[in-house]
Amino acid sequence: MTNLIDGRAIAQQIHAETAARVAVLKSRGLTPGLLFIRVGEDPASQVYVGMKEKKSAELGFHSTTRVLPETTTQAELLTLIAAANADPQWHGILVQAPLPRHIDQTVIYAAVDPAKDVDGFHPVNVGRLMLGDGGGFIPCTPGGVHELLIRSGVALSGAEVVVLGRGNIVGKPMAAILLQKGRNANATVTVVHSGTRDVAGHCRRADVLVAAMGVPEFVRADMVKPGAVVIDVGVNRVPDATTKSGTRLVGDVAFAEVQPKAGLITPNPGGVGPMTIAMLLANTARAAENFLGAR
Ligand code: GUN
């Protein structure tokens, strides 16, 4: 029997649920709208936003991508966000990271209306996640990992979870999600990072290990407890002379040696990646449902 967590199949389930919600919204006269904003020509961002927009159209959302030049000023971007906040055709707004260095990401994410912040990056939504009130938007990648764990039947209450990485997009919100009191969380969460003394020792205690620190194949078999659930969030481009491009993508987990030891493990690609889009579109459906409810 395979020990793989099939992120593509679980994302498909969520897409089907979201498509049904979109159909209900449309039957009530509302087409949910999602605006993507991309600044500059970062090749990975072009691919990611293209995939997100294609899927949103497939599920029946109305969506557009505004592409701004690398030279766009922070003030210009803020003006565009203010217009999108005020425009009732947009229920969700996503400003793709990374932004050019002259733009302060925290200022930009704080400018998006929290009710349209389907990325869950606005300080109000970050705060609501910490408070555990269930009403805000949860960042898509850790939200997707949570759904993978729930839908794979992983027991989280009382589990020892180790999150590798303390970034604002994955590590910190991942810890906040799993430590909440509640049936599908209630874990004992440890976040390890570059200042941690014995990373491997912490990892070896984990029932669930979430690798999100952006170091190629950092998690080796000797860091994993037999039977642990291993989730690989990493997307790292490494040199590889045998490929046409001269590079290949690897995760934060040394998959070949860790898989035989793991109870369950995400493949990479095909694990966490598809879930990010699924959660984005589920969040956008909820933003539109909230809009309709408040009207
Ligand atoms: N860049 C990498 N991941 C994400 C994400 O989840 N949202 C946005 N806006 N940008 C990203």
Image (tube, rainbow, N blue to C red):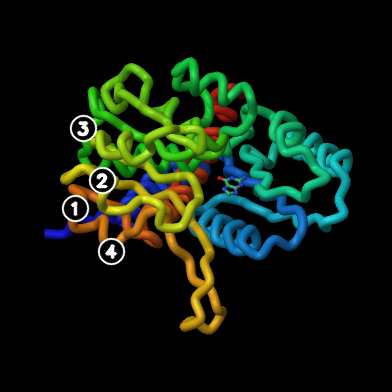
Q: Which residue is mark 4?
A: 256
Of the two numbered discs 1 and 4 on the same chain, state the one appearing first in sequence. Answer: 4
Q: Is mark 3 within 8 Å of ligand 1?
A: no
Q: Secondary structure at mark 1?
A: helix
| Most foreground residue, 77 or 28 | 77
Residue beneath the point at 62% across and 39% down: 92
- Which marked residue is nearer to the observer: mark 2 or mark 3? 2
CB atoms at circles 1 and 2 under 8 Å apart? Answer: yes
Q: Nearer the viewer, mark 3 or mark 4?
A: 4
Q: Is residue 49 left or right of residue 184?
A: right
Task: Specify which label sits upstream in the sequence, 2 or 4.
Answer: 2
Q: Which residue is mark 1?
A: 261
Q: Relative to residue 240, is residue 219 drawn left or right?
A: left
Look at 25% across and 45% down and name the residue there: 224
Q: Which numbered circle lies on residue 212?
A: none
Towards the viewer: 93 or 152:
152
Question: Label 1 vs label 3: CA separation?
Answer: 18 Å
| SS of the residue under disc 2 | loop
Mark 1 vs 3: CB contact within 8 A: no
Q: How far apart are labels 2 and 4 at the CA level?
A: 13 Å
Q: Which mark is residue 155?
A: 3
Residue 144 image-quadrant placement: top left
